[in-house]
Image (spheres, coloured by chain):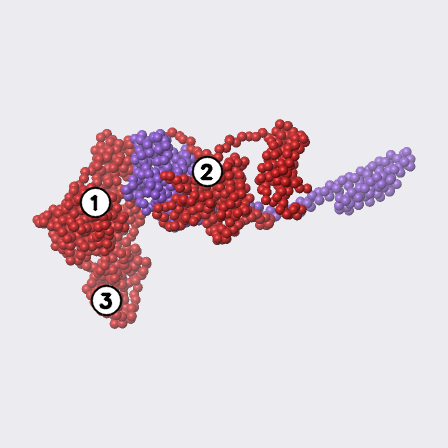
Amino acid sequence: MQERLQALKEEALSEIQQASSMKEVQDIKVKFLGKKGPITEISKGMGKLSKEERPKMGQLVNEIRTAISDQLEEKIARLEKAAVEERLKEETIDVSLPGRPVKRGNHHPLTRVIEEIEDLFLGMGFSIAEGPEVETDYYNFEALNLPKDHPARDMQDSFYITEETLLRTHTSPMQARTMEKLNGEGPVKIIVPGKVYRRDTDDATHSHQFMQIEGLMVGENVRMSDLKGVLQSFAKKMFGEEREIRLRPSFFPFTEPSVEMDISCFNCGGNGCSVCKGTGWIEILGGGMVHPNVLRMSGFDPEKVTGFAFGMGPERIAMLKYGIDDIRHFYTNDSRFIKQFNSL
Amino acid sequence: MLVSMNWLQQYVDLDSYSADELADLITKGGIEVETVEQLNKGISGVVIGHVLECQQHPDADKLNICKVEIGEEEPVQIICGAPNIAQGQYVAVAKVGAVLPGNFKIKKAKLRGEASHGMICSLQELGIESKLVSKEYADGIFVFSEDVTPGEDALEYLNLHDEVLELGLTPNRADAMNMIGVAYEVGAVLNRSIELPSPELVRSDEGVEGYVSVRVENEEDNPYYGATVIKDVTIKPSPQWLVNRLVSAGIRPINNVVDITNYVLLEYGQPLHAFDYDRFGSKEVVIRRAIEGEKMVTLDDVERTLSSEHLVITNGSKPVAVAGVMGGADSEVQEDTTTILLEAAYFNSKLVRKASKDLGLRSDSSARFEKGIDRNRVVGASERAAQLIQEIAGGTVLKGIAEQGDRTIEALDVSIEVNRINQVLGTEITETEVAAIFERLQFSYQNFGGTFTVQVPPRRPDITISEDLIEEVGRLYGYDNVPATLPVTESTPGQLSEYQVKRRHVRRTLEGAGLYQTVTYSLTSPSKRHFFSSDSVESVRLAMPMSEERSELRTSLIPHLLEVAQYNRNRQLENIAFYETASVFLPGDELPVEQEHLAGVVSGLWQEHLWQKEKKAADFFVVKGILEELAVEFGVEERLTFARAEEPKLHPGRTAAVYLDDELIGYIGQLHPEVEKELDLSETYVFEINLEKLLQADVAHLKYKKLPRFPSVTRDVALVVSESLEAGEVKRVIKEAGGSKLVEIQLFDVYQGEHLEEGQKSLAFSLRYYNPEQTLTEEEVKKAHDRVLKAVEEQFGAALRQ
Ligand SMILES: [Zn+2]
């Protein structure tokens, strides 16, 4: 009997070792440890044994049963682990395959530049004024110190609709429109982005429609040095911290004194290159101190307040900033062009 | 304005300044120097030659064999093909080894068997523009008319070592449209004194009275008119120095008298006109308005029709010149002219501008009158011209000037306080510095305790108010010396308006949904102005369009978006997803009504992931989903509705009108297949809405809703209905019948085909019931759900699909 049990154990262990699937393991379990299996048989037959032998045999049977079950447990764990490993192997993917594209569009580059400038001036306490694209002659010219017979205004440069209305040639009309509403009470701090129109034939550097951002600050004690400070912040933000600015005297009918602002060339750092035409400086915008006639016509007393104004072209800024070579790209809307402006 | 360095040097000491340095200083001072041109364009090795012999080439009719002395031991042989070459001439010779413009090197050559050691040059070959070469040398070589020495530098005689600054003058700086004005400016910029011409004119004893009188009808039109008479002049070519000055300024030499008037125009900024006295036709100069329709032939041999808005010079009976613009052909100075009537006048700038514009004649003269000349320099200029004529063309200047009007006007007093200058500029300029600047400008002034009263000379008509003086001080003090400060005025919050915030959200939502922003033109053609039948029939049209293509303001954004779609499709960029926000323009009262619209165009594949074989073509519901998302974003998802609509340019079965509450705010749909075909586009979807209506919709503030505390119950139901019945209608009825416990209705299947009768479809909805107060009972759900089933059965005959 003892030999029989030993033989059964050997046989079971050997079968367990050879088993390669869960089913085989289950079959082995049933075969050896099941209710009809040989060990159960032997247990049942133990009644015939003597009193002395019975506990000894009982212990042996238990030992063998435990040994087999332990081996079975171990085998099951090993098979389960192998099965998991097999599944993981099957589930392995090629991580180098391209991901699913996320559908996303982006701003037009002009909007991108305009929003950047808007945010910069919002941060300096300016608000954003918007006005009509079709303007009266009064707001577009007269209120800006350009009376009807002024040599600086030429009918040929503007798109008139009637004698008295035209497509605005700049966003400056909002200077007068904004100031008029305030009845002489400052301060005024606005920028005015928007579309403007001039009688130009479209080519690489001209467009009959383009964007402009006008800026205006009026209040007690607004100085030209403030204009310089504000524009310096603007230049550094848009073109880099290392940028220097310089103001050159110029002429606009609605400012006195008038200036043009250059920035040190971001391409060559001021040594001269093709971007700055060898001068080391790039012309960016025009501005000046608001002409007393403009203040007066809009209800402000030039004895009490002063102001500065400036105007810049987002196309020019975008062309310089991104190295765009043809202004027509902005209005052709080639998707290969627009899509380039999809990252920060 | 072109400024020759050599010429300018006559008035201001420019020593130690190169042309580039000077250009930089002038630019910083406020007049932009646009270019600095080297007149010699890299030429070298051109000397004066004396043609000792000149014989026809034995083998070539048009060539001559010349022996030319060029200051070397032996004369050289040069073959020359110019028709005007002749023995005895002094000419410009490019020696062997010389370099001409364009890096053209002169080498020894053989022409038809004869050696040629150099080239005899025309002015064009020396880099002078054809339009600046006088007629006599236009088609041949240049011949020196004065005493010159063979072997000397020919460029020196032709002033080709000069450099020329091109000034870009703003309209206020007409004072620098002449050399004297430039001298004042450069003197101020460099802080150097200037020396101006002071003509010493010897007049004969014979008075001008017996020759001519002047009558100005209206002194407002012509505040001053002066006529000088010069007898016994000889018309001939000008001396080389005068020719050189004109060429450096870009003016073609004609003859001595005309050249002198041009020279004085350049030097003084005073336009002059020389009439041939004998051809003038009377002894009386009358300045008056032209008679409506009056005709005259101008110098350019064109007959001009004048109006009463034009000022003319007449001989008492007929016009002989358009004042300040151009003289008449009849009284032009010609080769046989002997007596000159020299006009020096101050005309009303507006009248000159009007005539110049109406007649399409812009001249150096009109340009100066239009921008304003120096009233106090008129007589000086006429004396300068008379003196030069006497010197160069011979002749006798008669005593006196036949004139009307005041010769000079007084300086204008303008005051400014030093404090005010510093307050406006943000500087700390001292009284002494201000005084020094006015002295540099050669302005007289009085200073009482920091208040300067400046006598602004009439040569600077741009200075009329104290701010103009601030600019003068500022620009010469140097804007580089103005500090950069931050404003000290009261602080203001910088913020976007509610509408501006929302507009930025619109862009981000659309771009997040996959659309790219475009910017297109507002001006368009009449046929692309509108798109929808509801668009305004009346247009806002330009008075004088540049082209029909850009003649009207658009009332719809779609036509230009379709152009963008076509443009991209023609470049194999077929997956299109664009939007634009922009104003459209409707006829209004004083100004057109501008409305901000949002429009989009979508075509081709909407989504694509190649290796996973995912492809989703753009369709109606892609576009509709985007608008629905916008509605959610702006809190109007319940109020924005879509209703089947018909539009001639859209697909009759795939078009919806978009309503906000009961108001039509736009359309969404597929292009009509015929339109697609016409534009060569594939299946294309468009939308356009009035963005202002969406963004200005009155919506309640966002408020938190309590999270559900009880479970909800979901019932699915598939309804078989007629295929023509719209799902939206069924949903509406379900919602009405479901009552307050029915909180969500989702359509999850639309089916047609097998197991269904022809003409029928199945719509499957998922209905969710919820009671916020307590857990729903089976009873409550059943009651509500039965109501729903009953309603759809009664209204649509809908059967439950098994
Ligand atoms: Zn550079």
- Point out residue B263 in the picture as x, y percentages from the top left corner: 21, 50
Residue lying at 38% horizontally and 39% vertically, measured from the top left: B589
Do we see residue B133 in this rendering? yes
The amino acid at mark 3 is Cys
Tag 3 secondary structure: strand
**Mark 2 vs 3, N-terminal side:** 3
In the picture, measured across the screen, residue B545 lies left or right of residue B644, that is left
Figure chain in red: B
Q: Which residue is mark 2?
A: B692
Report the front residue among B620 and A59: B620
Residue for point 90% across, 36% down: A47
Residue B347, labelled with which disc? 1
Q: Is residue A305 left or right of residue A325?
A: left
The answer to whether marks 2 and 1 mark residues whose Cβ atoms lie closer than 8 Å is no
The chain identifier of the residue carrying mark 1 reads: B
Residue displayed at 51% across by 31% down: B700
From the image, tell me which residue sits under label 3.
B66
Chain that appears purple: A
- Per the image, label 2 sits on a secondary structure element best described as helix
| Chain holding disc 3 | B
Q: Nearer the viewer, residue A240 or B148?
A: A240
Compare marks 3 and 1 and give the one earlier in the sequence: 3
- The single residue placed furthest to the top in the displayed view is B773
- Dot 2 and dot 3 residues touching (CB under 8 Å): no
Q: Amino acid at mark 2?
A: Glu
